[in-house]
Structures are given as structure tokens and as C-alpha cells.
Image (cartoon, helix red, strand yellow):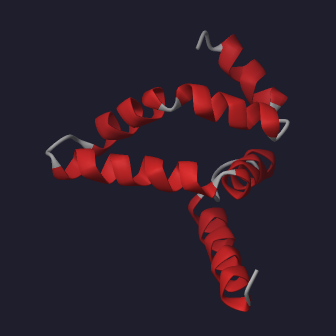
């Protein structure tokens, strides 16, 4: 990795931590681990949400539809990063 890639990655992590500051530290770390493992997936999700918003869909609806479309990939990523507690929480919520 070049120095610029390291700086970009570090900056993204700092931004994520500030945006997710209301989440418990464990959940924040989980999201960062997932993004580290598959940054392209999250970039694709962000682009799809933006495209839906530009097409006139509300942000919440665009986010929900996009996340549902990528649900299987996100679940696999949770398993790959060892985020069992989140899966158990989703099961308890009936998802």
C-alpha cells in the first residue's frame, strides 16, 4: 500500500468513527471491520443509494431498498468478520 492509500484509509476510519459516534464502540468497530474487509461493497451501496435519491426517492427508502438488495452479501460479511452478536440481535428482532 502506498502512503496515500494509508492516509485515505485512516481518514475514512476517522470519518466513520465521528459519524458513528452514537453507536457503542463494539458496533462501531464491527462496521469498520466490515468496511475494511470489503470496501467495494460499501462503495457500491453508497452509489446505489445516491442514484435512487437522484431519481427522486427519499433517503430512508433508498437506503432500506438498497440494504435489502445487498442483505445476503452483508450477512456473509458479518460472518466473515465474526460479528455473531449482531446476527443474534437481528434474529431476536425477527429479521
Instruction: Give x and y (percent) for residue 41.
Output: 55, 48
Q: Residue furthest left?
A: 56
Q: Residue at x 66, y 28 (%)?
A: 75
Does 84 appear above or below 59? Answer: above
Q: Residue at x 36, y 30 (%)?
A: 65
Quarter of the view holding residue 10: bottom right
Q: How many marks?
A: 0
Q: In this image, 12 relative to 64: left or right?
A: right
Q: In this image, 33 relative to 58: left or right?
A: right
Does 33 appear above or below 74? Answer: below
Rendered-image quadrant of the N terminus: bottom right
Instruction: Give x and y (percent) for residue 3.
Output: 73, 90
Q: Residue at x 23, y 41 (%)?
A: 58
Rendered-image quadrant of the C terminus: top right
Q: Residue at x 62, y 34 (%)?
A: 74
Q: In this image, 3 relative to 93: left or right?
A: right
Instruction: Give x and y (percent) for residue 56.
Output: 14, 45
Does 90 appear above or below 85? Answer: above
Quarter of the view holding residue 69: top left
Front residue of 4/65: it is 4
Amino acid at each position: 500500500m502506498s502512503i496515500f492509500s494509508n492516509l485515505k484509509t485512516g481518514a475514512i476510519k476517522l470519518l466513520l468513527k465521528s459519524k458513528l459516534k452514537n453507536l457503542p464502540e463494539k458496533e462501531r468497530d464491527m462496521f469498520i471491520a466490515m468496511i475494511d474487509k470489503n470496501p467495494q461493497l460499501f462503495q457500491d451501496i453508497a452509489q446505489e443509494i445516491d442514484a435512487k435519491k437522484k431519481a427522486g426517492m427519499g433517503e430512508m427508502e433508498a437506503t432500506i431498498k438498497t440494504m435489502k438488495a445487498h442483505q445476503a452479501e452483508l450477512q456473509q460479511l458479518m460472518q466473515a468478520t465474526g460479528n455473531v452478536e449482531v446476527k443474534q440481535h437481528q434474529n431476536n428482532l425477527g429479521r
